[in-house]
Image: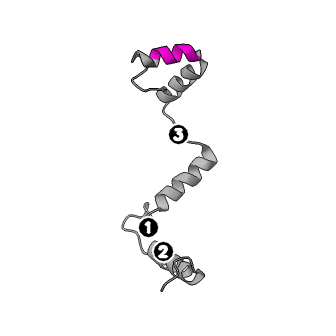
Amino acid sequence: MIDPISSEVTANISSYLDAVRACPASQAESPVMVPGDGLCRRRAERIANGIPVAQEVWDEICALAQAPQGVLRRQYASGAGAGRPI
């Protein structure tokens, strides 16, 4: 039986993934990636720089944060709040 958490298995997988990433890319500006690489990059970027939010969405968030809670509940209950419940 193979222990999937053993250091030997982990080392073999890391070595394999490093070999795949080291392959020549078909487009110079796009490196060879394996599943999960993009997610890891985006996560690191968002930890460092924050999560990108469209200005329209940010404006709506700011408006909601400043509105009295009772007003928001009535607005969303009536369907006037962009159709999204709070």
- Which residue type does callout 1 highlight? Val
- Which residue type does callout 2 highlight? Leu
- The percent coordinates of residue 64 (x first, y second) are 55, 21
Label ID, residue 52: 3
Q: Are marks 1 and 2 in contact (CB under 8 Å)?
A: yes
Q: Residue at x 47, y 62 (%)?
A: 36
Q: Is residue 26 left or right of residue 61?
A: left
Crowd rating for badge 2 (residues with CA inside 10 Å; few <14, some 14–19, many 20+): some
Q: Of the residues under marks 1 and 2, which one precedes in the sequence?
A: 2
Q: Residue at x 52, y 24 (%)?
A: 59
Q: Which residue is mark 2?
A: 17
Q: CA distance from mark 3 to mark 1?
A: 24 Å
- The percent coordinates of residue 23 (x first, y second) are 43, 75
The residue closer to the viewer here, 46 or 26, is 46
- The percent coordinates of residue 27 (x first, y second) are 38, 64
Q: Residue at x 45, y 26 (%)?
A: 85
What secondary structure is found at the residue carrying circle 2? helix
Q: Which residue is mark 1?
A: 34
The dominant secondary structure in magenta is helix
Q: Is residue 71 magenta?
A: yes
Q: Is residue 7 left or right of residue 35?
A: right
Query: Total marks drawn?
Result: 3
- Which residue type does callout 3 highlight? Pro
Identity of the residue furthest to the right in this view: 48
Looking at the rendering, the stretch of residues picked out in magenta corresponds to 69-75
Classify 56 as above or below 14.
above
Q: Of the residues under marks 3 and 1, which one precedes in the sequence?
A: 1
